[in-house]
């Protein structure tokens, strides 16, 4: 059955698109929810009248995806995962892991729109993930995966202060100095 979509329908198409769908899908899902209208002369004329409005919405989506692309390409995801001595991860970094990390940083992107080369990342290193945006627009994100042990060593080296001076250490130094001077005098 030929229908014209009244709204954007996930996995089917956008508003104003003409699609051929199964009769039951149209009758039982699309028509009752007002997601589509049957394809006939009257509905074609109705959508011709709304064509400018629909194109304006699509143009706005294109602009939004272009600005999102710029933001995503400037963004780097740094993940710390448990890994073995050889750099192999105990788990894997999937598109869901990346989607969760993007959500923490204010980007709401579905996991199905994120493509990782090889489907998952299974070792420490620097990778590139592709995010499919509106229509054919894509953005490339840099994903840096490091092991928890490396991160802990870096954090310990950065936060480790010089040996704290306490009363005990100063007393030990005084005793050592007096012992050195006594042995030198003798």
Image: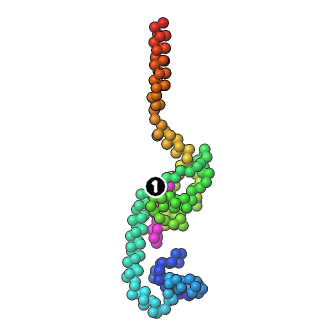
Q: Identify the secondary structure beneath mark 1.
A: strand
Q: How many marks?
A: 1
* Residue 165 magenta-highlighted: no
Q: Is residue 167 visible?
A: yes
- Residue in the foreground of this view, choosing between 95 and 171: 171
Residue 99 sits above or below residue 32 on the image = above
Task: Report the quarter where the N terminus lies.
Answer: bottom right
Location of residue 119 (image quadrant): bottom right
At x 48% / y 78%, what residue is drawn?
8
At x 60% / y 86%, what residue is drawn?
24
Residue 128: image location, x then y, percent: 50, 57
At x 42% / y 89%, what residue is drawn?
46
Residue 148: image location, x then y, percent: 55, 47
Residue 11 sits above or below residue 87 on the image = below
* Residue 141 magenta-highlighted: yes
Residue sticking out furthest to the bottom: 41
Residue 181: image location, x then y, percent: 45, 12
| Start-end of magenta stretch | 133-143
Residue 129 sits above or below residue 4 on the image = above
Q: Is residue 116 visible?
A: no
């Amino acid at each position: 059955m030929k229908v014209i979509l009244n709204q954007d329908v996930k996995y089917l198409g956008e508003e104003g698109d003409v699609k051929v769908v199964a009769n039951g899908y149209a009758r039982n899902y699309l028509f009752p929810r007002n997601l589509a209208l049957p394809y006939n002369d009257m509905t074609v004329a109705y959508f011709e009248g709304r064509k400018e409005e629909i194109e304006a919405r699509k143009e706005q989506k294109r602009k939004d995806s272009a600005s999102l692309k710029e933001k995503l390409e400037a963004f780097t995801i740094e993940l710390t995962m448990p890994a073995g001595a050889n750099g192999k991860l105990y788990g894997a970094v999937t598109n869901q892991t990346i989607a969760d990390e993007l959500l923490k940083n204010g980007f709401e992107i579905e996991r199905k729109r994120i493509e990782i080369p090889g489907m998952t990342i299974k070792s420490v290193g620097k990778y590139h993930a592709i995010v499919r945006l509106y229509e054919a627009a894509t953005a490339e994100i840099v994903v840096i995966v490091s092991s928890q042990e490396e991160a802990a060593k870096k954090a310990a080296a950065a936060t480790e202060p010089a040996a704290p001076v306490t009363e005990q250490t100063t007393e030990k130094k005084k005793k050592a100095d007096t012992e050195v001077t006594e042995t030198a005098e003798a």
